[in-house]
Amino acid sequence: MIATQLLLHSANPDGQEITTWLLTYPRIIHAEFMTHRVFSRNASSSRAIPIQKMCAAVEDNPAQFEYWGGNKAGMQAGAELQADELALAQHRWLQGAKDAVKLAQALSESGLHKQNANRVLEPWSHITVIATATSLGNFFALRAHPAAQPEFQTLAYRMLSAYLHSAPEIKAWGEWHIPFGDRMPAGLSEADRIRVATARCARTSYLTFDNEIDVAKDIALHDQLATAGHWSPFEHCARADDAGHDTGNFKGWLPYRKCFGTENRRLTREELYRILSTKPAWLKIAP
């Protein structure tokens, strides 16, 4: 299953666009997606999702290849397998998913935490990602391309089609791009809308996002994230910025995290030594 939803598409008065996406794709291509630094993103985590939920997802909807290419030299596969060869490869892949579920369950039953036991499920798992970017040209040129991994091609071509069929909402200088803003209760202040949207994006990590918004809980989560310094969810809301320079990975837009003076504070060596002192006993580091 590869699904793409363009959640919000905005442009500043100069025409610089910003897009926020809700994406679901096989976890096997996530490392390649991470190489595109133009995106700010939050993703579902194998460490956070209960093992029963991960196992059920693999049993009900295991990730499969979009193109079952034949073996040949080089990075790109040959012609797609046919008939008996294709059926055998697909059968063995799905059998691997069943075996992985059994292994994950056995590891869990032995007392192993989900941050370890869930890892054996990842080749057959999907990942859900919130991604925001202001520059998509290079991404589309590289990934909506026959040389890309077929699963990545499917993701990129679907994103490209959605992008080309979308018209951005023009924002005045100083106005905000707020993902999920259309799903919030009426009467919220702009500041609270931004806080709630930030929490919505953060919840992607443990897959508790749904259409029901509890404003108080989301604002509390926003405040907890800011206090702890978990800044990645603060990069999806952004303000149309006429300063004329790039901010982080954005052009023409100021990400919300930049409104916090502590978001990239330089630590002293003393503070770094205090962090080092929290090293767990099981972790050995050579002097």
Image (spheres, rainbow, N blue to C red):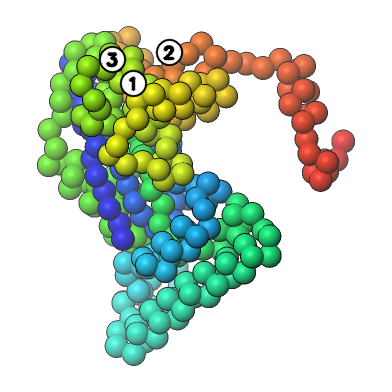
Tag 1: residue type?
Ile
Q: Secondary structure at mark 1?
A: helix
Tag 2: residue type?
Cys
Q: Earlier in the sequence, mark 3 or mark 2?
A: 3
Distance from disc 2 to disc 1, alpha carbons, whole Å, reads 12 Å
Q: Quadrant of the N terminus?
A: bottom left
Residue at horizontal 68 percent and vertical 65 percent from the top: 110
Residue at horizontal 42 percent and vertical 76 percent from the top: 94
Tag 3: residue type?
Glu
Q: Secondary structure at mark 2?
A: helix
- Label 2 sits on residue: 259
Residue 136 quadrant: top left
Residue 18 quadrant: top left
Q: Quadrant of the C terminus?
A: top right
Nearest the eye: 68 or 64:
64
Nearest the eye: 2 or 282:
282
Distance from disc 3 to disc 2, alpha carbons, whole Å, reads 14 Å
Q: Earlier in the sequence, mark 2 or mark 1?
A: 1
Residue 92 visible in the shown view: yes
In the figure, 71 relative to 169: above or below? Answer: below
